Amino acid sequence: MLDVFLKTLPFFGLIGLGWLAARTRFFPEEGAVWLTRFVFYFALSAMLFRFAAGLDLGALFDARFVLAYLAGSSLVWLIGLVGGLARGLAVPEAAMEAQCCMIGNTGFLGVPMLVVLLGEAAVGPVLMVLTIDMLAFSTLITLIIHGSRSGGLRLGALLPVLRGVVANPMILSMLAGLTWAYFGLPMPGPMNEFLILLGAAATPGALFAIGASLARLRLGRLATSAWLSGAKLFLHPASVGLASLALGVEPFAAGVMVAAAALPVAGNVYILAQYFGVAQQRVSAAILISTVASIVTLPVVILLIGQG
């Protein structure tokens, strides 16, 4: 346990450093915004392209893996939605709480951390989880809120949502890398070195940016936020794990899926909450609580995966 904890500690140390720098105002708030943009559009995209370009496409897509993650995640999403509706929340608020229960920080935290901790073989499953989250659930929450506010879905509201998903640089970089792999194109030496150099900035940059963004989040509605954090850190990995067992997903891929599900609430949920003006305080606190708690919970999950 100690060995696993010590391996994850540097990642959370970088998050803590970013938080401290922003909290003391040594690193200004606009600095965090621009650092996040650099990571999102350049460093992380370079890392994802290089990872995807080196994948074996024949072994990448596993229908049982996709079904297990969708089934387990959808169950947790529905639990979050029903829990919110039972407390008398409007549909947009309940849907945003449901999003907190199962959207993890796979892009900025999961990709760099899990690939280092679990090895290069984790790349395919992690990218699959990231793709499903963005294509399925991020689209779902946007459509639900648009539909509930406009009395139903209209084509005019649907097209901007789809364009936003397709234009996401993480989606574009993965699609470009997979296309490269599909055609079996060789990777020229200078291009590979360029991608390695730029992609190497993704891990420290992303973790520092996470910490800096946490510094401006505030605790509030603690009981609800604690429930949302618990659902993300415990219920979500348990649900996808059981779905993986039921569907017979290959053990290593199932383990990566469970580890990805055990990640804290993603920062992009707060971006959506801000954009739509829905449950910002609860989402903010859930991100903060789940990120701090994952310092302990994530090593435990990774240890259990290592033990089979």
Image: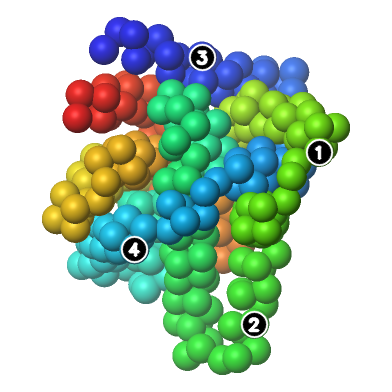
Q: Earlier in the sequence, mark 4 or mark 1?
A: 4
Q: Residue at x 27, y 46 (%)?
A: 250
Characterize the local packing of mark 3: few (<14), some (14-19) or many (20 or more) Cα atoms within 10 angstroms. some
Label 4: which secondary element: helix
* Residue on which disc 3 sits: 10
Residue closer to the observer: 185 or 66: 185
Image coords of residue 153 (percent x, y): 51, 88
Q: CA distance from mark 3 to mark 1?
A: 32 Å
Q: Which residue is mark 2?
A: 159
Colour scheme in use: rainbow
Callout 3–callout 2 Cβ contact below 8 Å: no
User: From where the camera sits, is residue 283 visible?
Assistant: no
Check disc 2 and give the amino acid type: Leu
For the residue pair 162 and 255, the one nearer the viewer reads as 255
Q: Is residue 131 above or below residue 203?
A: below
> What residue is rendered at 60% in x and 47% in y?
52
Image coordinates for residue 150, horizontal then vertical, percent: 53, 87
Position above or below: 122 against 247: above
Distance between mark 2 and mark 1 Cα atoms: 37 Å
Label 4 and label 1: CA atoms lie apart by 33 Å
Q: Nearer the viewer, mark 2 or mark 1?
A: 1
